[in-house]
Amino acid sequence: MNIIFVLIPIAIFFVIIAGAVFFWAIRSEQFEDLDRQGSNILFDEEQPAPKQTGHQDDSRS
């Protein structure tokens, strides 16, 4: 029964931390544009041209 006196403050501490992180995310506008990230996966980004590998012939005489 004594463990309950330890677990309740720990649980309250975690709730306070989660609330602080949530309100920080709201204030820093993390949730402003939810549609963009979902639609980014549908469109291909332009890929840079592949580098030319100048491999040399291994000609041994």
Image (cartoon, rainbow, N blue to C red):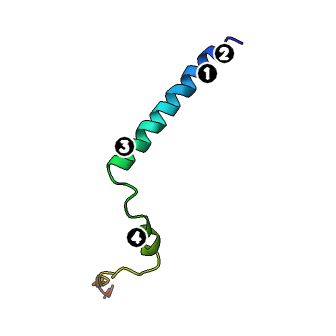
Q: Amino acid at mark 2?
A: Ile
For the residues labelled 1 and 2, the Cα–Cα distance comes to 6 Å
Tag 4 or tag 1, which sits nearer the N-term?
A: 1
Residue at figure coordinates x 50%, y 26% from the top left: 13
Q: Tell me whether the residue at label 1 lies in contact with that at label 4, contact meaning CB atoms closer than 8 angstroms.
A: no
Q: Which mark is residue 3?
A: 2
Q: Amino acid at mark 4?
A: Arg
Residue 15, position as x, y percentages in the image: 52, 33
Q: Residue under label 4, please give it.
A: 36
For the residues labelled 2 and 4, the Cα–Cα distance comes to 46 Å
Tag 3 or tag 1, which sits nearer the N-term?
A: 1
Q: Residue under label 1, please give it.
A: 7
Q: Amino acid at mark 3?
A: Trp
Residue 45, position as x, y percentages in the image: 36, 79
For the residues labelled 4 and 3, the Cα–Cα distance comes to 21 Å
Residue at figure coordinates x 43%, y 43% from the top left: 22
Q: Residue under label 3, please give it.
A: 24
Query: In this rendering, would 55 be left or right of 4?
Result: left
Q: Tell me whether the residue at label 1 lies in contact with that at label 2, contact meaning CB atoms closer than 8 angstroms.
A: yes
Camera-near label (2 vs 4) is 4
Q: Tell me whether the residue at label 1 lies in contact with that at label 3, contact meaning CB atoms closer than 8 angstroms.
A: no
Residue 24, position as x, y percentages in the image: 36, 43
Q: Tell me how many marks there are.
A: 4
Residue 59, position as x, y percentages in the image: 32, 88
Q: Amino acid at mark 1?
A: Leu
53 or 41: which is nearer to us? 41
